[in-house]
Image (cartoon, rainbow, N blue to C red):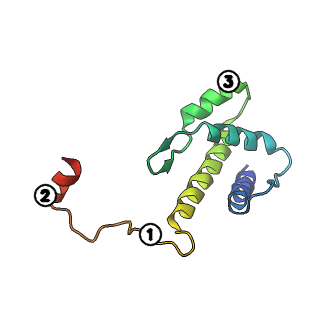
Amino acid sequence: MVKLERLLSAELRRNLAAGGRPRLPDGADILWGAFLDLSKARSYHAAGPNPISFNEIEAWIRLMRWPLRPHHVAIIRALDDSFIESFYRNRAQPPAGGKTVPQRSGHAVSPQLFDVIFG
């Protein structure tokens, strides 16, 4: 199953980068569909997507009545890891010719600055 996990993760990264129709190995369409369903229902925070939790996967398995095994869940989690990694890597790159704000301030945190930010 490790080979399938690597193949699907690589295909997801390729698909996120280039788009188009995914080229899935035989028998992987169920896991790919499960990941897509779970990804559609994922929660987001201020900086981007949250990982799919084990509770969400378990609830999906019960609702859809799919007899997924632990190695199937590991593959779904690996796909999610690839998705999250791709999201944040692409987000870190500024658009061509665009200006960005530095991710870190050059100022040291002082008690006064802390009070200004957090009250």
Q: CA distance from mark 2 to mark 1?
A: 26 Å
Residue 86: which numbered mark, if any? none
The residue identified by callout 3 is: 63
Tell which circle, 1 or 3, labels the residue nearer the N-terminal end.
3
Query: Would you say 12 lies left or right of 91 here?
Result: right
Tell which circle, 2 or 3, labels the residue nearer the N-terminal end.
3
In the image, 79 versus 114, the foreground residue is 114
Q: Describe the element under mark 3 as helix, strand or loop.
A: helix
Q: Are marks 2 and 1 in contact (CB under 8 Å)?
A: no
Q: Residue furthest right?
A: 26
Q: Is residue 98 above or below residue 26?
A: below
Q: Are marks 2 and 3 in contact (CB under 8 Å)?
A: no
Q: CA distance from mark 1 to mark 3?
A: 44 Å
x, y (%) of residue 86? 59, 59
The residue identified by callout 1 is: 100
- Identify the residue at horizontal 20%, vertical 62% (top origin): 109
**Residue type indicated by callout 3:** Leu
Mark 1 crowd level (few <14, some 14–19, many ≥20, 10 Å Cα): few
Q: CA distance from mark 2 to mark 3?
A: 52 Å
Tell which circle, 2 or 1, labels the residue nearer the N-terminal end.
1
In the image, 67 versus 8, the foreground residue is 8
Residue 38: quadrant of the picture: top right
Q: Describe the element under mark 1 as helix, strand or loop.
A: loop
Q: Is residue 73 above or below residue 109?
A: above
